[in-house]
Amino acid sequence: MLSNEPGSASKRFFLSALFWLIVPGILGLTLATLLYTPTLSDSLPLAVKPYLSFGRIRPAHVNLMIFGWLSQAYAGGILFILPRITRTKLFSERLAHVNWWLWNTLLVGAAITLPLGLTQGREYAEMIWPLDWLLIANWVLLAINIWGTFARREEPKVYVSLWSFMAATIVFIGVYAVGNKVWDPSGAYTGMNDNIVNYFYVHNLFNSWFTTAGLGLALYLLPKLTDKPLYSHRLGLWGLWSVWTGQHHQLYSPAPDWLEYLTIVFSILAIVPTVAFMTNFFMTMRGRWGKAASEVPLRFFATGAIFWAITCAQGVAQSFRTFSLYVHFTNWVVGHTHLAFVADYTFWSFSLFYLMIPVLARRPMYSRKLMEWHYWLTTVGMVIFMVSLWIAGLIQGQNWLTYSVPFLETVKSMVPYFALRLFGGAMAGAGVLCFAFNIWQTVRQPAPAPITSPAIAPSAGGGE
Amino acid sequence: MKISRSIVYLTAGSLISLLLGIIVTIIIPLQDPAALGPSPLARPYTAQELRGREIYKREGCHYCHTQQVRAPEANKGMVHQKGDIGPESVPGDYYYQSPVFWGTERQGPDLAHVASRKGIGDNEAWLRLHFNNPRATSPGSVMPSFDYLSKDEMDALIAYMLTLK
């Protein structure tokens, strides 16, 4: 249960992440199917109908994907990286196992309560009050391992990723506590402030956790996968920008105008850390594009990085009031969200798996061919998915702003795009099945005896 | 030593930026006079309306329906008829609400002022038929049927919908 073997907790996190990729993935396909053929649910028996209703499945899909799949893949990656960049053992492998059990308890709890309709009704903050605390407990345990390993490091230099992990955990715990008002069981802010706090939380969940920790993972992956030192070790602490930018989710809303202007300025300034990371990426990639063409892990990483740049560019564009008026509330936004969560952070997580699972299982990946299938099905599928939603969103925005097309007509015009999205999503899902089968085949036999020196400290050397 | 200094900077910088974010984007907006009182459209809910609101939340209606009309589209946007999206939403409209259902997507129309739409949103029979069989009232709708709600629940939901004037 609570093994002390180095790497055992990391491996467990990776495997349960894989499970939590498939479950909400199926829910996502269900949602896409229901938008394309809403009558499908009419024929369901009354005993199951409520639990498969669109409005209940949607929060389950979102919460399990971000707190299950992505966050557990991050945790697996972080626990793998920590001992290697500090040249010591993890602060406590057993604590990491406790963390794993509690984390999966949280996810099972969410998977049960959300379809039951037990929700706080705020986007990304739906989980009920006891689960809020369980979530915070999980991040505290992870932070203890990160900070504890930092404290006993034997590598005198602190690699740039470690700073990111340390900042990401402490800022995120604060953001989650405030955003979910965890000291109050009702979790309730009221009126306009409820939405202001919710989007403070939503955007910082994205920036303080997924982006700050994600860039920490990326800055470890980049030199490992390219086998080349990082171009620059300077850290663009993305999370520090983000605390100001959350309100760009509600331009032209009833929120105060000055708050909107402030958030627009800071959203535009977010170009700075974005350009810093992309410069680092392209300079490190110089002379390694051939490697990206021939090797799937680096190819996933590079594709994710390019999608990340597009996410940031879209994010800045969406922070302008004129563009926001046009695309806000449309399917464009759904496309943008999947660009960020799937095409960047999930793609980077795929690289984490392909780099780390063979080390943890002490054998090469079961099939290179399946890795290729995974890459092409998922990438092409997601491009179809996102592009069809972007086009759909532009059409919706255009029609709404003519002020003369009945709303129902704009709904009917979505049918072909919902069909394409479903097709793209199913294709990406097929890729994920190749991935899951490949990982399973690699880890399912007991690992051979450890090789004497599995040293994979970042070849880039120390930082700072 | 350099690293111990860096760790102080990192921790302090992270916490200060978090705190500044909370002060500027949460605490100062809390003082906004516009949000300190109800608007003419806002009123406290009855027990039944509040129950209906909870059902609206439980069924996730807010994932596909916004309840906020932005200034440029106010009194111009079209749901059934030109301009029936209604007037611009103001902070006081939400005075009695928790959580608010501003929403982020419009797979269905904005509902901030749905109960002001004559013969449709203000009509109990139309709403009941719409919830039980969305495509009977609105061919091409992608809304799920809510025929699994009990009669009490349906009555409460409709009572809540009728508050959205």
Image (spheres, rainbow, N blue to C red):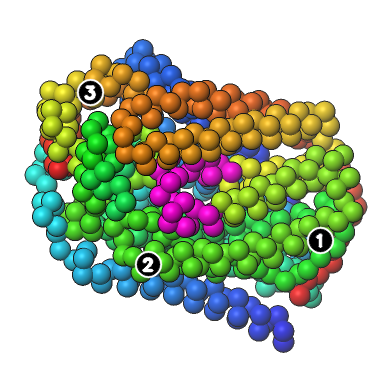
- Residue B130 numbered tag: 3
What is the magenta segment's predominant secondary structure?
Answer: helix
Q: Is residue A338 magenta?
A: yes
Q: Is residue A32 magenta?
A: no
What is the three-letter code of the residue carrying label 1?
A: Met
Residue density around tag 2, few if under 14, some if 14–19, many if 20 or more, within 10 Å: many
Q: Please tell me which residue is depicted at 66% across the width and 58% down the height of the picture.
A: A215
Question: Mark 1 vs mark 2: same chain?
Answer: yes
Q: Please tell me which residue is depicted at 63% across the width and 66% down the height of the picture.
A: A273
Q: CA distance from mark 3 to mark 1?
A: 58 Å
**Position of A104 compared to A35: left or right?**
right
What is the three-letter code of the residue carrying label 2?
A: Leu
The secondary element bearing badge 3 is classed as helix
Q: Please tell me which residue is depicted at 82% across the width and 59% down the height of the picture.
A: A284
The secondary element bearing badge 2 is classed as helix
On screen, B159 above or below A462? Answer: above
Q: Which residue is mark 1?
A: A283
- Image coordinates of residue A137 in percent, x first then y, are 48, 57
- Image coordinates of residue A365 in percent, x first then y, are 82, 35
Q: Which residue is mark 2?
A: A259
